[in-house]
Amino acid sequence: MANKIKLLLAEDEAALGQIVKESLETRDFNVILCENGEIAFHKYLSESPEVLVLDVMMPQKDGFTLAKEIRAVDDSIPIIFLTAKSQTADVVEGFSIGGNDYLKKPFSIEELIVRVHNLIDRSKTQKTSTTLEIGDYSFDFPKQLLKFKNEEAIQLTHREAHLLFHLIKNKNQVLDRSLILNKLWGTEDFFTARSMDVFISKLRKKLKNDERIQIINVRGYGYKLTV
């Protein structure tokens, strides 16, 4: 039997959310159902789902706001918006935030499943074929290999690789410290913050062959990678 797809569903309509959850779970999905955007964000950080299905209109934190926060630390996870809205402006906003697809209510479970599978297949293809470039370095994120020009590639640890990935994908922008701590360490207490500082120092040393590359500490907020 194929592994179940872990899907996070953020839907404040309890009856609809339960119906979608139960329907998906009969089709080899593991569904994390959240009743609002605030809960959904914390579950995203702790549960590491493969795909997000977010209702746009939710209490405490709407789907667009939630997607913005998630995209600050993860620009690859597939996001599908659910909405009763159909105005062009809302659709455009959803895609501009980083949504990958848009499903208007009411919708069929079969259509949702097809869209989820399409996005996951596309995401897996991109991950296996993508090498990121930063200055004179190339970074193979799936293999966690960092290579300088024609020298032999060095193996990064899991956290080094994920931290560098987020820095590169947010190049020349400040990467929020608390979001990364929660994403990679699951907490943002003093000891994990110090641990992150150590990993930043290690990355600086491994990127030192290109003097143009800088990882800048933006006091009180986070880090910024510049070239």
Image: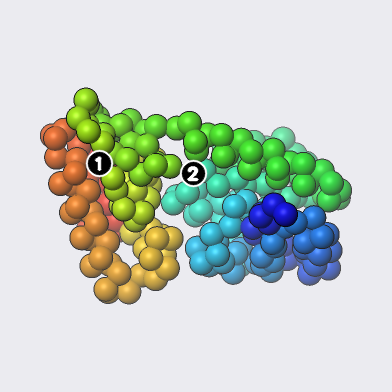
The structure's colour scheme is rainbow
Amino acid at circle 1: Ile
Q: Secondary structure at mark 2?
A: loop
Q: How many marks?
A: 2
Q: Secondary structure at mark 1?
A: strand
Residue at image location 22% in from the left, 48% down from the top: 203
Image spot of residue 183 (x, y percent): 43, 60
Would you say 69 lies left or right of 88 here? Answer: left
**Residue wearing tag 1:** 154
Residue 118's image quarter? top right
Q: Residues within 10 Å of mark 2 (few under 14, many from 20)?
A: some
For marks 1 and 2, give the one nearer the viewer: 1
Does the rendering let one see residue 94? no
Residue at image location 55% in from the left, 64% down from the top: 47
Vertical placement of 91 versus 221: above or below? Answer: above
Amino acid at circle 2: Asp
The quadrant of the rendering that contains the N terminus is bottom right
As drawn, the label of residue 75 is 2
Image spot of residue 167 (x, y percent): 33, 45
Residue at image location 69% in from the left, 52% down from the top: 2
The quadrant of the rendering that contains the C terminus is top left
Vertical placement of 153 versus 1: above or below? Answer: above
Residue 11's image quarter? bottom right
Question: Contact, CB < 8 Å: mark 1 with mark 2?
Answer: no
**Sooner in the amino-acid sequence: mark 1 or mark 2:** 2
Image spot of residue 31 (x, y percent): 70, 62
Would you say 180 lies left or right of 204 here? Answer: right
